[in-house]
Structure formats: C-alpha cells, structure tokens
Amino acid sequence: MLHPEDVYAARDRVAETARHTPLEYSHTFSELTGADIRLKLETFQRTGAFKIRGATNRIATLSQAEREAGIVTASAGNHAQGVALAASRLGVDSLVVMPENAPVSKVKATRSYGATVELHGVDYAAAAERAREVEAAEQRYYLHAFDDETVMAGQGTLGLEVVEDCPDVDTVVVPVGGGGLISGVATAVKDHNPEARVVGVQAEGAASLPRSLERGERVTLDSVDTIADGIATRSVGEQTFEVIKERVDEVVTVGEDDIAVALTTLLERGKTLVEGAGAAPLAALLTEAFAYEDDETVVPLLCGGNIDMNTLTTVLIRGLVETGRYLRLRTTLQDRPGALEDLTDVISAHRANIYAIQHDRTSRNVAMNDAEVELAIETRGPDHVDELTGALEAAGYEVEILL
C-alpha cells in the first residue's frame, strides 16, 4: 500500500522537473455553484499535464542497469509526453507505444520531447500489450502509466501542493482513468486531513470504477468511448484499486455533453483551456454529480490541457449546442425565387445569426418542386432556440433539429 512518506520523498525527486502549479479562486464557478471553488491549474505543468510527476519519480529511482537498458511504456498521450521529457532530462532512452487514434498533437509532442513513438491498437489496453512485447524482446524497463506505487507517489505531489496552498480544503475532485493520480492525491490529502473528502470522476463511456467498487473487484470494460482521452482506460489498476477502496470517499460519472459544457464554460468564462479529462471534475460540480454545501471549499484538479484541435472544435460545438448557443436545422421550401429570402427573414426577425446555409434542389427526400435547406445558426440560449423554431413552424416550415 502506498504510504504518505512515499509521496513526500517523491516531492524532492520531482522538484527540479515538475512545476508547482497555481491554485486560484474562481469567481465564475463559485457563483455558479455557491461553493468556494479553487482551481488547481495543472494545465500549466511542463508537458501540459500532471503525468511528468510520476514519470520523473519512477525514472529517478531506476537502477543504473535499468536506465542503460532504456524504458518502454504505453500511453494515450499525457503519460507519453511526461515519460519522454523526464527520460530525456535524465539521459534515458525511451520508446512509447500509443494507440493508433491518439491525438496527433500528443504524438508530435511526445516525439519532440525525445521519445521514439510506435502507434499500435485501438486503445490504451492494446498499446500496453504491444509495449509488454517490446519489454520482453528488447529487455527494456516497462514503466506503467498508473499501476506502480512510485508513479502514484509522484502524482501525489500534486495533492501536496493542494493542501499546502489551501490547508482548509474540504473536497478535492479528481479525474480517474487508471487511478494513479487519485491514489497519490488521496494519500497526500488524507494524511494532511483525514476528514477532507476525495471525490473521483469518470466519463460515462469509460466508467469501470463504479462497477468495480460495487462488485468489490476490478471490472474491465470491453471498450471505452469518450472525448476525455486522458481517462479512457478499460479498468483501474490492481494497486490503485486497493488505494482507492481505502482512501477515496466517492466516485461519480459525467456524460460527454456535461464534459463539453464544462470545457466550453471554462474556456469562455475562465479563459483557461483544458482537455476532456481536465474538464471532468468541473462537469461533476456543475451537474451536482456529488453533493456539496454552500461555501464548502472545493478544489477540482484541472489535470491537463493537451486537447487536440480537431477534438476541441467538436467539443466546443457540442458545448454551444447544449447551452443553446448553436443550432443546426433542416427544412424544405418551394423552389421559387424569393423562397430562401422569406425563410431568412423569419430568422432575422428573431435576431438569430446565420453561420452557413446549404441549399439542395436535388435531394431525393423532397418533392420535385421543393428544395432542402440546412442552416447553422447562432442563438442566445435555450429559450431563444424555442422561440426561433416556434416562429419557423408558425410560418409553415417543417423543422428538423440536426444539432
């Protein structure tokens, strides 16, 4: 079992590589929730995520023979970058196996930090199997992304920073993939104050931990599906599961739309960009996935900011849709001069802004003398969406909401 002393020892090892990241009060999220919200901005960490903490601690404790043999690991992205930079700084050769669908930005960054990257498999589990093959074939040291007490201790240094900067913290909210971060953070936080609460958050599309806790044994999912690629693992680790059972108070899940809204809100109101995993704790707060009191001091860990630009585009649109700020609809109109103008006049009269129009006379879904029109529209909220669609229907248009 991981001990608090392991986390304190790790702090000295990672101090020269990992930054002490800011912890800031958030007026926006405090007003939205009624609680006292302090954001742990681990997005400002080197490589853009917390993973460099655990990677540095693990590599620093390897024997000389293990360092000379080189290391191999598997990662969906953030651990890959942490290992690559930590290994380069410590003069160790690294090979990282990443899923074939890993974000391009994370693959490029990992290579830029000095690692050799091999793409293999559809997810982290498949990449890990390949990394184990490399371990056996090349006699490299396999550096696990989370199921390693030394890695967990390194990640726990983030928890030490939280309690040092906010000694009166009541609740720390932590995203959970394999469980390395929450294991280390819970160990640090509970050592500081056993009454402080640690809440884990998983994406619904990768929620192995709630089922594991319910059954009392680790559950491995057949597949995962979430925009939060940093926590897209099929199961938690064997060692992390034991720590979680003992030291984590509650585990909740959040949906993809909830993550998108949290990410969009943080970017727009907090001027801070996070990836899906980093937005998950905020999503749990905003949806009240766990109970909290007014004025309770809550620290969500914004654990990473390495979001792929293509993914960001998708997430932002989803977030705008969910908050009634973006609407895509389809309708039909008579194929005659002025018909499109009549349609846009209705939209203009209700102060909605048209982003794009696609006009198709050849669609098989409409009559010969009709045209199909798809519109992307900027709206001001759910009430405005209802007002606009109601006005279109009152004007005789059949409206199909696409987004």
Image: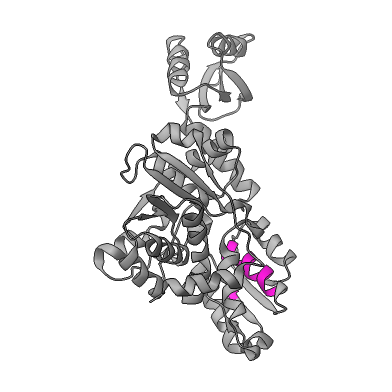
The correct choice, above or below, for 387 with respect to 244 in the image is: above
- In this picture the colour scheme is one colour
Left or right, 160 with reference to 169: right
The correct choice, above or below, for 388 with respect to 363 in the image is: above
Query: Which one is nearer the viewer's eye here, 150 or 274?
Result: 150
Q: Residue at x 60, y 60 (%)?
A: 102
The stretch of residues the image draws in magenta is: 73-87
The number of discs equals 0
Res. 224 image quadrant: bottom left
- Tell me residue 275's x, y (percent): 56, 50
Q: Residue at x 64, y 9 (%)?
A: 337
Q: Residue at x 56, y 77 (%)?
A: 143
Left or right, 244 with reference to 177: left
- Tell me residue 201's x, y (percent): 40, 53
- Tell me residue 263's x, y (percent): 53, 42
User: In the orientation shown, which residue stands out farthest toward the left?
Assistant: 215
Q: Residue at x 41, y 52 (%)?
A: 172
Left or right, 384 with reference to 54: left
The correct choice, above or below, for 161 with respect to 12 in the image is: above
Q: In the rendered image, is residue 77 in sight?
A: no
Query: Which one is nearer the viewer's eye here, 188 or 386?
Result: 188
* Magenta-colored segment: predominant secondary structure: helix
- Tell me residue 310's x, y (percent): 63, 47
The correct choice, above or below, for 51 with respect to 174 in the image is: below
Q: Is residue 196 magenta?
A: no
Q: Quadrant of the N terminus?
A: bottom left
Res. 109 image quadrant: bottom right
Query: Which one is nearer the viewer's eye here, 126 or 343?
Result: 126
